[in-house]
Amino acid sequence: MLSMLRGIPASPGIVVGPVHLLRWEVPEVRHRLVDDADIDAEIARYQQALDKARARLRLLRARTETQAGATEAAIFDVQLSMLDDGELTNHTVALVRQNLGAEKAFDIVMSEWRQHFARSSSPMLREKVGDLTDVHIRVLSLLLELPDHDPVDVPPGSNTILVTHDLTPSLTMQLDRNCIAGIATEAGTATAHVAILARSLGLPAVVGLRSALSALRGGEVAILDGADGTLLIAPTDDEVAEARQRVADEAGRADVLRELAHSEAITRDAHRVVVRANVDIPEEAVLAADSGARGVGLMRTEFLVVGRATMPDEEEQYAAYTRVVKAFAGEAVIIRTFDVGGDKLPVGGYPHEANPFLGWRAIRMCLDESELFKVQLRALMRAAVHGDLRIMLPLVVTVDEVRETRQLMSECVEELAERRVPFRADVPLGVMVETPAAAVSCDTLVRDVDFFSIGSNDLVQYTLAVDRGNANLAPRFTPFHPAVLRLMQQVQRTGAAHGLDVCVCGEMASQPLAVFALLGLGIRQLSVAPRAVADVKRVIRGVRAEAAADAVQAALATSTAREAETLLRRRMRAELDR
Ligand code: PEP
Ligand code: MG
């Protein structure tokens, strides 16, 4: 058995603790017949499983409400109402009365429901497929008496490392941070949303550990190193002692890092850089406000939506955006409109698409569902009275998308004025430059937008045709490819020529070497993971922008990402050592 599994570093931190395996998949169900005499007992067994599932969901609901808030807890109401559905029970019981085992009967009914919901023309029903799947798995696991797969059963304070194939954003949101101390997944990459969310939640994580489930039994002790991207199974006493020492050392360095995080972001040759924070969930705003970052460069609003049965209404969104704006009093807070689609949706929430990353998502979906989009725009324009809120559109490929949004914003102005609620009509509107189309033709956007923000995660994905979430392709996913660097240079130059702010808010902005390259390209605004602020400022304060510019010119002249990266690393080290 392999004792050291290597994956992709996703969220830093070391955890020493027991492994808990989570197989969140619909289990196989064998055909089983029951005798006539046993039918009533079989029905009672089914009812007991429903009762246990209800009790479990109520527990999850209560815990989520205390830890995350009422909005997040509401996701469990849908599943509870499914368990109470009379039709579900009637159908299942009818099949048991025809001598089918309860698990098979329930499996048949739930499979039919999921298919029916997935094919529905109503988006509301389609959105519920993820919840149906959760209920399907939960009740079947109880009926089949499978080892308990529910993360809620892990004892509090146990410092558990959760190992699973993949985590949906909604499942990640459900994790109990009192007991789950780290995450390891077989799938995913550093820019997949599970990794981004793990960083937001401050959970050490390693992704892309391709054979983790088969290498583990569950219950054994392991050491997860989120910065190294490793999972060490059944470590020796010495290895455990060493890991614990490193945890203690890190805690000891916290004061130094805090001071660095709150220092000025200014290069040795006096170029000032604005370092803002990426915020994924409103609860994170207070932590982010204390991270040393000045404002928010990217708030990913889709995490208000994932795992939910209904879209949050205007009041709920207004409250969420206001919370973030108030946490950053006086600082810019850039809020991105819903970027749902691709890997950011609960399973089956929208029609199945062969290529979701090229599909009906982000600004495309919002413009097609304009009433839904206007709810968000109104909430944003109202929250903007509380501070310096700016709106940002994802996945833009043409200026038409900006103009259509402005048209919808004008309609919102009229609606809000009629309602006599306070709002701002002149909220700045910017775009994410995260497609090659937007980057190459950014000059066509300059007159219609107030700022650019480079989304390097998607820009790399679309430029290099490398799926950002595919663990097999992780080494090919690099922002140092000359094509990517050239596109960024073009955006920076065009933005600067027209007096527009150009920020970088993808994950590369949190990586020290990439920060050096971005400084060299002339970028002076970064939006980074709150926990990366100290490391980012260490680079900014340790180098000269002029030296970074020379280095990046040389990197742009290389032929491969590897050459560019090696060159940049050498030059950055030399700068930092000066
Ligand atoms: C990006 O694409 O770089 C980005 C910041 O957006 P997301 O990671 O949410 O797609
Ligand atoms: Mg993106």
Image (spheres, rainbow, N blue to C red):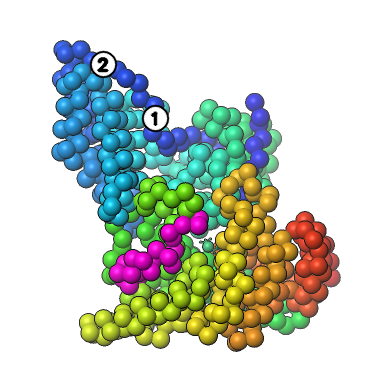
Q: Amino acid at mark 1?
A: Pro
Membership of 368 in magenta stretch: yes
Residue 96 drawn at (x, y percent): 20, 23
Residue 33 disc label: 2
Residue 313 drawn at (x, y percent): 28, 66
In the picture, which quadrant includes the N terminus?
top right
**Which region is colored magenta?**
357-376
Residue 489 disc label: none
CA–CA distance in space, label 1 to label 2: 18 Å
Main secondary structure type of the part rendered in magenta = helix
Q: Establish if 89 lies above or below 364.
A: above
Q: Earlier in the sequence, mark 1 or mark 2?
A: 1
Secondary element under disc 2, as helix, strand or loop, is loop
Residue 305 occupies quadrant:
bottom left
Answer yes or no: is residue 510 visible.
no
Residue at 77 percent across and 68 percent down: it is 556
Identify the residue under disc 1.
27
Q: Amino acid at mark 2?
A: Leu
User: Dot 2: within a 10 Å radius of its alpha carbon, few (fewer than 14), some, or many (20 or more) residues?
Assistant: some
Residue 423 drawn at (x, y percent): 33, 83
Secondary element under disc 1, as helix, strand or loop, is loop
Residue at 56 percent across and 29 percent down: it is 214
Residue 425 occupies quadrant:
bottom left
